[in-house]
Image (cartoon, coloured by chain):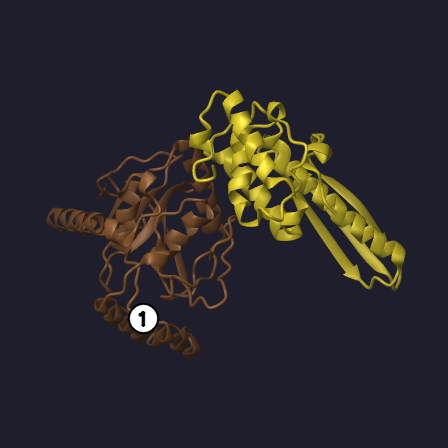
Chain colours: A yellow, B brown
Amino acid sequence: MHLDLARDFHDVAEINSRSGYCTYRQGAALGFMESVRAPETQNYYVQNFKHGSFGDAAQLGLLLKMTEWKQTVSVERIGRHIFNPHAPADVDSLTETVEAVLDAVAEFGPSVLNLRNLRAEYVQGEHLAALLRVTSTWQDEVADWNEALGVAAKAVVLAGSDPDDILFGMI
Amino acid sequence: MAYANLCAIPFGKEQVVIAVSKSQLGGGHLGIGFHSAKNGPQVLHLEWHRKLRAHSIPMDLTTCWIASPLNIPSGASKAIVALARVVATRGPTINYGINFLAARGSFESNGTYKPPKGSDGLTCATFIVELLRAGRVDLVKSADWKAHTANTDWANIVCTSLANTPSVDQAHVDAVRQNINGLRMRPFEVAGAASLDSKRWPAEFDDVQGPAQRVADQLDQVYRTSISVV
């Protein structure tokens, strides 16, 4: 499954804590998911528990849906600063973006990222540049990585910064 | 840019510094300094085989370090800090090895250590080179490095030391021994390369010899001063 950052990103309503669903059928599967948004950092954390056999197609489908949901949460974490042109670009917020990208790639592989249809007016250039820097190893596996580099450069200019500074070593 | 005592140089949250200390094996010891998210300034360095250390500055420092901010634009520097934080947090297990040509690309851009086929590991110096390479900062032209007989002596000492380390298996010692070829990327050379203008990166072997000697001299000077203060 590929997630389109520009298409699939949307804000998550603030949630202090929530239990997802818990299903159990004898001899089939038990799936349980918890999610929580940290009240201070606003980071979104998910735990996913899977037990049992998956001979039951319905249960397997449930688990696939869980994976899909986790991917969606990953994209939301990555996009939190990238899709806010006014997001802070201090080193701590950049670290959040880098960690979010790292987690997504570690869990789903680089192809989970899809940088199609990005527009410079709607992205924070430094955060997009950080994403590109830390995914440069897989630039051939991330859809439209090179095009996104051009978008980042335009976004940086729109923000009044120097692309040679932000994109040092990449352009 | 001149190197100075790591505890005395001011460096901001958005900067990384290249840090150098003395080494029992000669040639210096290399690390990278940055501000961690929670624990303030740290120096991250590959101390020895599977011993990646992050020491708080100045509390955890037991030896004299000198350092100089890495000469890259602030916008890119912030992303390198983020990358260093990720590597420090993950604490990858890294073998100590000498074949720096085979080790090129050891770090994926996201900070994951994944040694290429044929790599026997990293040294303290090539750890920094590879970490920065993952962040698109290419300090040295390692393919053109030059061999020296003194490096063969160093490599033999490394193998003896590895063999005397209880946690190192013989197969790793043998693999490192097979890679002895007179090539070595000395910490002072990497520190010297880092002191050059970024337009001269990736730096060639001959271009870093002078700066490398200056870094060694600066370390001696600061070391002598710190000893006399004690």
Q: Position of residue A17 (x, y in %)?
A: 70, 38
- Residue at the spot of label 1: B181
The three-letter amino acid code for the residue at tag 1 is Asn
Out of A159 and B94, give the one closest to the viewer.
Answer: A159
Q: Position of residue B189 (x, y in %)?
A: 26, 53
- Is residue B3 depicted above or below A55 in this figure? above
Q: Position of residue B55 (x, y in %)?
A: 35, 50
Occupied quadrant, residue B36: top left
Out of B132 and B26, give the one closest to the viewer.
Answer: B132
Occupied quadrant, residue A114: top right
Q: Residue at x 23, y 56 (%)?
A: B22
Q: Is residue B193 left or right of residue A75?
A: left
Chain for mark 1?
A: B
Q: Residue at x 26, y 37 (%)?
A: B9
Q: For mark 1, does the 10 Å Cα neighbourhood hold few (<14), some (14 to 19), or many (20 or more) residues?
A: some
Q: Position of residue B209 (x, y in %)?
A: 22, 52
Residue B230 in sight in this render: no
Residue B207 in sight in this render: yes
Q: Residue at x 47, y 29 (%)?
A: A163
Out of B84 and A159, give the one closest to the viewer.
Answer: A159
Q: Residue at x 23, y 42 (%)?
A: B3
The secondary element bearing badge 1 is classed as loop
- Is residue B156 depicted above or below B94 in this figure? below
Q: Is residue B55 left or right of residue A137?
A: left
